[in-house]
Image (cartoon, coloured by chain):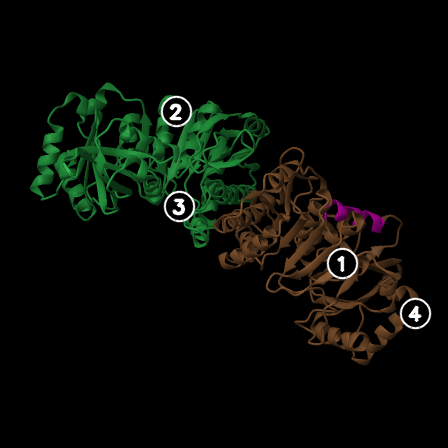
Chain colours: A green, B brown
Amino acid sequence: MALIVQKYGGTSVGNTERIRAVARRVARHREQGDQIVVVVSAMSGVTDGLIKLAKEITPLPSEREMDMLLATGEQQTIALTAVALHALGVDAVSLTGAQAGIVTDGVHTKAKIQNISPDEVHRLLDGGNVVIVAGFQGRTAEGQITTLGRGGSDLTAIALAAALKADLCQIYTDVDGIYTTDPRIVPGARKLPEIAYDELLELAGAGAKVMQLRSVEFAKKFNVIFEVRSSLNEAPGTIVKEETTSMEDVVVRGVSLDKNQAKITLFGVPDQPGRAARIFRALADGAINVDMIVQNASHEGGQRSTDLSFTVDKPDLLKASRVIEELKAEIGFKEAVSDEGIGKLSIVGVGMRSHSGVAARMFDVLAHEGVNIGMISTSEIKISVVIDLAKGEHALRTLHRAFLE
Amino acid sequence: MALIVQKYGGTSVGNTERIRAVARRVARHREQGDQIVVVVSAMSGVTDGLIKLAKEITPLPSEREMDMLLATGEQQTIALTAVALHALGVDAVSLTGAQAGIVTDGVHTKAKIQNISPDEVHRLLDGGNVVIVAGFQGRTAEGQITTLGRGGSDLTAIALAAALKADLCQIYTDVDGIYTTDPRIVPGARKLPEIAYDELLELAGAGAKVMQLRSVEFAKKFNVIFEVRSSLNEAPGTIVKEETTSMEDVVVRGVSLDKNQAKITLFGVPDQPGRAARIFRALADGAINVDMIVQNASHEGGQRSTDLSFTVDKPDLLKASRVIEELKAEIGFKEAVSDEGIGKLSIVGVGMRSHSGVAARMFDVLAHEGVNIGMISTSEIKISVVIDLAKGEHALRTLHRAFLE
């Protein structure tokens, strides 16, 4: 008897017919005698609809109240999924994140899981139930409702798999695995049979939408091997695990385009120690993730000053701009300009560690297509560049052809 | 500084514009220095939409899971109301029923409040916050999410007013008070300046939709004087309180038509002791409210047997029918027939206690209009009859003219 954690995303539970299909799949596994924990997201569209309601009232709603609001989406799905399993004669009980023992810190809308007390889940499993847990949510030690941020349902599934010492964790989604790049943009994209945590981490950080970064980090940390596969068919998906030696034979595992970044440039920052630290501390205090950072010295009007650019997630742009404006007097920069018209293009592969010249070849390919490079950032297994958003998809197809076809 | 509990129903919070209007009203009270607890229902349509989703999956979803599902409606409204207050610069914190300390028994979909621990509400009020509590819901001592049944938000407000020892409880709704009858059916209906708990209880039990029965019972028990008034204007509403001597001068306070009842008749029930008790015990065990009961002796085929009729709420009809079918062999009745085409017509007034001949006059008026009476039930201050649903509205107008115009 195996213990399986299955996670179904918003599209997989997008309407009652799909929820019934999920229930049938769960019931088939149950018939094989396995214990099943099902983690579900909000039905697709529900979370966005709720955000729209809140923004009709005010552009920057309180994060505590957004958690209160958004946690309802998953709570609806768990109830409907339990009802669908009952209709098939399968014993099932739904649990909110709080009821499932998922305790987080108090950073609303981006809470981190602190610990999971799996007693209630174990008790219900031992009682013969399928246990359906609301993804994306938890509670603080004081009983406040929190959410884990977009894609947090994956995190719930992987963290539960770790806490329950599950035999298998399956992430069901609307794609049938992890691809070399986004198949909707690049027709030649191929499904990967396996991928290393680090590669998926870099791809996720680079905008590949299959998995949220923190989920993969969590899986890597607790060595939870998981499979990304489709809820619409029976095809095997992509296994995500610790890298093996043979994986290094492939130089580039995938390429990706992140359209969800925005750039803020501070012009005329006085060139004095501690200014950058002050800026990024303030952004961090606001729980704003900064991705790429570039600083160039300039000498405007004889005074030593620098221009500082960084990128943030587009939804954080308004908040980040406010944080920056509040610092204007203190830091003494001339002007802050934000740009939503950028794309971040990345190539990823553990094989880069042992192969040189990958960056040069990437820049060459882009130059040949007339794509101007704004910012560059590299890691051991990734190279990212910021380019004009309008040229993003064409550049992605070009890179895929150069490295992966 | 007064402590005011204000309850806003589903129509009053039916969209974000209305939620903002509620926030403006709350803010005006807050400016006067009062402490405010706001209880809100789900936005109109939300609960019905969720029920529809569940019924797309199965006609009789589990009640525990329905509570899990439906509790999300109010949770959404509290968050949006808090956000709307923040947008006006008013400190506000939302609490689910569970977080507000509302502990209930475990009868899902119809839970009874067992106690309220108002510490968290007091703590937040003392911190200068408007506290927004989700109506209609609570939790069991074991942490299960429960709901109080339709109209349960009124109960939440009145129970909170009692637990907090509030100075005032206002029930804001889409009508501006309690009327002699439904103004949508009877143009001559008049708003009552005041009404006794018992009268409102009988009217609510008779299908008047302004207030749920249990809320009024609770208010009577804990002597919570409350006002039913409109969220759309500033007109004073109807004060609901213990009856006074002067109230007895009015014989009939109101008339009502309940279209939400259904009748089940068991034909050929063997005339032996204990049969009726067995039937109504089984219905009670299923948490099905039975309203009127009539039994007539009959002598079919020489064997002594009776026909037994009773009414239940229409939504409970399917469940009640199943309970009855399961008892068929044990009880030995011939046939069970259900009828959804009935209406219950009632006249109510504390003055009936001291005036005779009211029933005779009511039956007279109905007979004169050719309305046949199926079942009759009376209390000290109410007379109800079951009639053909098709004749219900006409009969209501006729009774209103006879007793109240």
Q: Crowdedness of circle 1 by 10 Å Cα count: few (<14), some, many (20+)? A: many
Give the SS element for disc 1: strand
Residue occupied by mark 1? B240
Q: Which mark is residue A224?
A: 2
Give the side of residue B356 with respect to residue A1, left or right: right
| Amino acid at dot 3 | Thr
Give the side of residue B274 with respect to residue A71, left or right: right
As drawn, which residue projects farthest toward the bottom? Answer: B368
Report how far apart the C-alphas of labels 4 and 1 lie in the structure: 26 Å
Whether residues under marks 3 and 4 lie with C-beta atoms below 8 angstroms apart, the answer is: no
**Subunit bearing disc 4:** B
Image position, residue B161 (x, y; %): 70, 47
Report how far apart the C-alphas of labels 3 and 1 lie in the structure: 49 Å
> From the viewer's perspective, is the residue at label 2 or at label 4 nearer?
4
Report how far apart the C-alphas of labels 2 and 4 lie in the structure: 79 Å
Residue beneath the point at 57% across and 40% down: A89
